[in-house]
Amino acid sequence: MKGVLLVNLGSPESPTPKDVKPYLDEFLMDKYVIDVPYLLRAFLVRGIILRKRPEKSAEAYAKIWTKEGSPLIVLSKKMHEKVKKLVDIPVALSMRYGSMTILKGLQELHDKGVTEVMLFPLYPQHAMASTTTILVLAEELRAKHFPNMKFTNVPAFYNKPGYVEALANSMKRHLEGFEYDHLLFSYHGIPERHIRKTDVTKSHCKIDGSCCNTPSPAHEFCYRHQCYETTKQVVKLLGIPEGKYSQTFQSRLAGDKWLTPYTDVEINKMPEKGIKKLAVVTPAFVADCLETLEEIAMEANHQFKEHGGEEFLAIPCMNDEDEWCAVVAKWIEEFKEDKK
Ligand SMILES: C=CC1=C(C)c2cc3[nH]c(cc4nc(cc5[nH]c(cc1n2)c(C)c5CCC(=O)O)C(CCC(=O)O)=C4C)c(C)c3C=C
Ligand SMILES: [Fe+2]
Ligand SMILES: [Fe+2]
């Protein structure tokens, strides 16, 4: 029998330093997230980052936490519930980090008699820190615990018409009545080194102005190319003219050079360029989370106004919107019907 495992990132158990610390430890000790040799990673994470960050992150999580829990988990569960009702094969939900483990998700499917799993990382654009780490761990667990299971991995869907149309329609609804001066596409950042590492040609990605617009097999795994492509297709569908939108990368950690331009730096410069009404969309996330609700809707909003901006609209992620759930259900149906 066929089944589906949806996988997102995960959240701490509570917005307290006691629970944020082990969550960050699991997350940042992942070799696909901080991709340096183990001893250096342990020194950076346990010797430096985890000394102060759990307190700071817990404060940020506390600002967005709901009665039901972390928004990322609550919203992913809502989406999962809706999708389950639209299809007639088992669908489980896991998180890469934290208590809703991939092992539990696979076990749930196994117990229902599933032998062929559609492994579905809930990230529109491919990155080793988000997608690869899920695929690698799931494969390790499969080999160890479920050797007879077969996986079909869902590739990045950054340019799939269903995703792009659902995103554009969702944005249109949220932008109704908001006469913005500028629309910013803010994607989660990654270190530039990750782009070079995932370049299958080993020579294409120069991270300059042009490589992401020059066709190449490298783009199958190039996060930067895929972000530009999502933006390009959405603005085309919405008919947004050149100059009225731009693209940036958010959420960087200190140390490495991350993809530029940086969201916070660009937003703070906008009011002096005459942008007083700003809308921000975050298409690297399908569910609202710390990075959209605190970093953008609260912090960037505040900074924009401190620098002279007047109105700020953080466009919500698609979460459990009907159109998005229907798209996911359609892809599941296609997998179910696929006789290969
Ligand atoms: C080296 C560090 C990080 C990389 C690389 C990275 C890539 C990456 N992350 C997401 C999605 C999410 N990240 C979230 C939170 C978050 N991300 C990092 C670090 C890296 N992410 C940290 C330390 C945190 C925790 C919060 C903090 O302390 O600032 C979240 C939100 C989780 C939540 O509970 O709400 C998401 C989602 C992607 C898609 C990605 C690569 C493209
Ligand atoms: Fe992240
Ligand atoms: Fe590129």
Image (cartoon, rainbow, N blue to C red):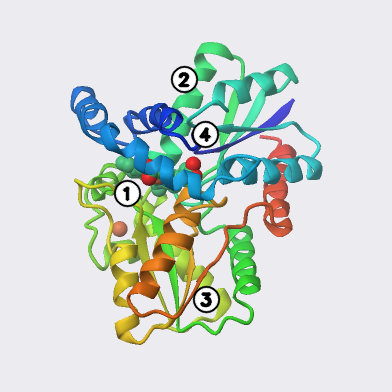
Ligand 1's image quarter is: top left
How many angstroms separate mark 3 from mark 4 (CA)? 41 Å
Q: Which mark is residue 140?
A: 2
Which is more N-terminal, label 1 or label 2?
Answer: 2
Instruction: Indicate left or right for 327 with 102 as reference.
Output: right
**Helix, strand, or loop for circle 3?**
helix
Q: Which amino acid, by three-letter code, is at mark 1?
A: Ile
Q: Which mark is residue 236?
A: 3
How many angstroms separate mark 2 from mark 1 (CA)? 25 Å
Q: Tell us which disc is closer to us: 2 or 1.
A: 1
Q: Which amino acid, by three-letter code, is at mark 4?
A: Ser
Q: Tell us which disc is closer to us: 3 or 1.
A: 1
Which is more N-terminal, label 1 or label 3?
Answer: 1
Which is more N-terminal, label 3 or label 2?
Answer: 2
**Which residue corresponds to the image point at 20% horizontal and 27% vertical from the top-left?**
43
Question: Where does residue 105 sit, x and y in percent of width and height?
Answer: 62, 25
**Which residue corresponds to the image point at 36% horizontal and 57% vertical from the top-left?**
250
How many angstroms separate mark 3 from mark 1 (CA)? 26 Å
Which is more N-terminal, label 4 or label 1?
Answer: 4
Instruction: Indicate left or right for 170 with 64 as reference.
Output: right
Q: Answer few, some or many: residues within 10 Å of disc 1's Cα (few below 14, many 20 plus, some between 14 and 19).
A: many
Q: Is residue 235 shown to the viewer in this render?
A: yes
Which residue is disc 1 drawn over?
A: 190
Q: Quadrant of residue 17?
A: top left
